[in-house]
Each structure stands twice: as C-alpha cells, then as structure tokens.
C-alpha cells in the first residue's frame, strides 16, 4: 500500500514532481565529468580570506559546537548591524531586526513561507534566480512576472502598472541582478518603492551581491528609500560577502513585526546555523581590513580581462556593474545558435562550461545571452577565452 502511494505521481507536490536539477548543478556536473573549465556556476577559484578560515577552525576546536541561539549568535547580529550601518547607512536593531539563516537560500524560503498566503500575488522580475519561483509557488503565491531584457535589463512604470494589482502581497527584487550583472538604478528603486507604498506591498530584497559592485559604485538598499523601512525584508549572504560560497550563512533584516514572522519560519526550517561559521563571519565583518575594497577591485580586474579577451575574439560583451558575471550576446556576436545549444556544444566539444541565461526565464525567454563567471585566475580566464573563440568559430 505504502509502496503504491509513493509511486503515484499525485502523492508528490506538483511543484517538485517534474522539477529538473538546477542549471548550475547540470553545468558543473558536465564540467566535472568532462574536465572542462567551469565558468558556469558562480564561485571563485580562490578559497577566501585565510583569517576567517582560521577563525572558523579555532571556533570549531575551542568554541561551542552546540545549538546557538535561534536568531543567531548575538555577536554576529551586532556585527551585521554594524556592517550595514557603516556601508549602507541602515540603522538595524541586532536583537529585534536581524536573523541569521543557513545561507540566503534559507532566508528566501523563510520569507516566502512566512509572508505568502495561498492566492497572494507576487511580483518577480525575469531573469530570476532559480530558487524563487518553485518556493513562491509552493507557498501558494501566484507569480506575476515582469520581463527584463538586454542590454539594459531595466523596468519602467508601465511594466510595474501591468504587474501590480490589489492582490499583490510581495515583490521580489534582486540587485545587483544575477545573471544580468546590472545594479538597479536609484531611479528604478525609487519607482519600485513608490509602487510598494501605493499598493501596501512587502519587498523581499535579495542583496547577496551587495558587496560585489564595480567602478566605484555603492550599493543602495531598497530598505533605505522613503516608506520602505517597515515593509522591506533585506537578505544578505556571507558566502558572497567573503567569497566562500560553501559557507551557508545568510541574514534576514526586517522591522520587528516582519522579523517575528520570519523567525517563526526559520525556527522550523533549520532552527540554527553552525556556530563556528557564525563566529568567523562576525569576526570578518568587525575586522574586515581592506577586504571590501580589495575584493571588488580584484574581481573588477578579472571582469576587464575576460571582457577584453572576449571582445578580441569577436564576442559582443554586455556591461557588468556587479556580481561575478559577464554576459555575451550570441546573436550580436554573429552566432546563430541558442544560448543552451551553444553552452552544451562549448562544454562537450570545447571544454568550457557557461550558463545559458534562458534558464532564468519561466516564460518568453531571452535565448541569445550566455553568462560567464569571471571570479577565476588569469590563466583560467585566458584559456577559457581561447576555447570560447574556438566554439564561436569564424
Ligand atoms: N540569491 C542569489 C541571487 C544568488 O546568486 C545566490 C547564490 N549565488 C543565492 C541567492 C544563494 O545564496 P546562499 O548561497 O547564501 O544560499
Ligand atoms: N548563485 C550561483 C550562481 O548563480 C549558483 C548557486 C547554486 O548553484 N545553487 O551561479
């Protein structure tokens, strides 16, 4: 009887019944299998700041390995508040407005589960990070998609008018935007804030890339815009702040009534996050040295190296203002192939993995943009350019 039930597709929630493995896992899997250079999934080939890794090691051996407080180590919550106060002008109460999660992924899940009721409309922007839609749907949300397209990936008033309604409960914004590599402009943030206030909507802001911005830019959190302080859930990730993507330590920041609901979901998703990693992240935020200048400066050099090589090879390269990613427009580069077909051929025949941006669309995809991760050493980038040039041919 039990065996029959688990074979029956109806026993599986429809959101997960046919969900494929993520494009990041697919491309990294192919890269591993074929020994290809991996410019697909976004992770640096550098192992991250040694001082933080030492601190985590010490905390593992000398410190507590038992449950830390549910909302996170007090020292980490204070460090997060201090960091966002110094770098983004936010005034967050560490006791009532910050919750430590197991990565931004858990923070997103906690936000969707605690804020969406079945039938609530949720405005999201395509291209969208792969975790958003399944989790929004699983929470009972009805997605309303705003489609952004290259080269500027911007939204305007008419697009927001078409997406927002009296049933809108949440809007999900990712800035800097993965995979586009753009930073949402102040003008667009102000416009979105106006819509959130007018429609009484909560903004879930995925700001994991906030520290990875280039050319002298400073990250502007939507939470800092008029009317947004009480209606924004700001999400960060230590994995991205310190370039150690396997460190699943994230943060939820929100006004106390929202934070209470978020904590309610967090306590039954993971309850806590490893205390040793939390201690090391607190140390890194309190004593960053020049990390938050040297890290983006180094990545900016890598971005420029990859962009120059690709242009030299005849690719049409889109601007990147933040994230680890640079995009090429295949059609504008004279390549008559979809992004997915090109990506599969590049990894199988030329030994270089990339991510087709069409994977970030649920409907009406942009199909000629390829995302490349430049958080790699110079030799890796140079070798990848050579291989991509061969894949391009001509
Ligand atoms: N949101 C975005 C936009 C991301 O790019 C990522 C991962 N790179 C995440 C969330 C997940 O972050 P974490 O690894 O902290 O769960
Ligand atoms: N955020 C990473 C990227 O965009 C991937 C994270 C993952 O594989 N889940 O490449």
Image (spheres, rainbow, N blue to C red):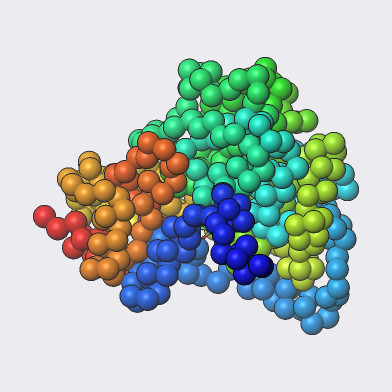
For the C terminus, give its image quadrant: bottom left
Q: Residue at x 64, y 26 (%)?
A: 168
Q: Nearer the viewer, residue 101 or 163?
A: 163
Q: Position of residue 387 (x, y in %)?
A: 24, 65
Quarter of the image with the N terminus is bottom right
The extreme left residue here reads 394
Position of residue 14 relative to residue 186, above or below, is below
Height in image: 381 above or below 92? below
The total of numbered circles placed on residues is 0
Q: Quadrant of residue 392?
A: bottom left
Drawn side of residue 198 relative to residue 385, left or right = right
Residue nearest the viewer, comparing 186 with 291: 186
User: Height in image: 349 above or below 94?
Assistant: below
Q: Position of residue 290 (x, y in %)?
A: 62, 58
**Residue 41 in view here:** no
* Residue 339 in the figure: left or right of residue 168: left
Residue at horizontal 65 percent and vertical 19 percent from the top: 166
For the point 21% across and 49% down, which residue is it?
Answer: 337
- Report which quarter residue 366 is drawn in: top left
Q: Is residue 160 visible?
A: yes
Q: Position of residue 152 (x, y in %)?
A: 39, 33
Q: Between 124 and 78, which is closer to the camera in this rendering?
A: 124
Q: Residue at x 81, y 60 (%)?
A: 271
Residue 86 in the image: state x and y as whole percent.
72, 44
The residue most toward the front is 1
Q: Quadrant of residue 201?
A: top right
């Amino acid at each position: 009887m039990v065996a029959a039930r688990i074979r029956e597709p109806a026993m599986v929630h429809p959101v997960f019944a046919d969900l494929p493995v993520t494009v990041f896992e697919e491309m990294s899997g192919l890269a591993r299998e074929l020994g290809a250079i991996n410019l697909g999934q976004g992770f640096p080939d550098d192992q991250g700041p040694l001082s933080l890794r030492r601190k985590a090691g010490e905390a593992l051996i000398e410190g507590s390995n038992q449950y830390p407080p549910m909302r996170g180590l007090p020292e980490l919550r204070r460090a997060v508040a201090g960091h966002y106060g110094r770098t983004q002008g936010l005034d967050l109460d560490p006791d009532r407005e910050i919750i430590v999660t197991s990565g931004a992924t858990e923070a997103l899940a906690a936000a969707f589960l605690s804020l969406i009721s079945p039938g609530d409309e949720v405005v999201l922007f395509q291209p969208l990070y792969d975790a958003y839609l399944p989790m929004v749907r699983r929470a009972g949300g009805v997605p309303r998609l705003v489609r952004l397209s290259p080269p500027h990936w911007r939204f305007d008033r008419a697009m927001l008018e078409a997406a927002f309604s009296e049933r809108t409960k949440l809007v999900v914004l990712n800035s800097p935007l993965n995979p586009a590599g753009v930073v949402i402009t102040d003008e667009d943030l102000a416009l979105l804030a106006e819509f959130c206030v007018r429609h009484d909507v909560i903004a879930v802001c995925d700001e994991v890339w906030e520290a990875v911005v280039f050319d002298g830019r400073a990250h502007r959190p939507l939470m800092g815009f008029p009317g947004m302080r009480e209606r924004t859930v700001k999400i960060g990730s230590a994995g991205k702040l310190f370039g150690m993507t396997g460190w699943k330590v994230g943060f939820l920041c929100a006004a106390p009534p929202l934070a209470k609901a978020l904590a309610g979901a967090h306590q039954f998703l993971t309850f806590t996050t490893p205390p040793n990693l939390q201690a090391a992240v607190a140390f890194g935020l309190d004593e960053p040295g020049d990390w938050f200048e040297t890290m983006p400066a180094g990545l900016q050099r890598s971005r420029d190296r990859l962009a120059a090589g690709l242009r030299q090879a005849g690719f049409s390269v889109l601007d990147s203002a933040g994230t680890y990613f640079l995009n090429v427009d295949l059609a504008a580069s004279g390549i008559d192939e979809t992004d997915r077909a090109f990506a599969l051929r590049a990894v199988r025949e030329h030994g270089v993995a990339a991510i087709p941006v069409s994977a970030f669309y649920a409907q009406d995809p942009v199909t000629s943009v390829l995302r490349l991760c430049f958080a790699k050493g110079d030799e890796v980038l140079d070798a990848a350019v050579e291989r991509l040039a061969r894949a391009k041919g001509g």
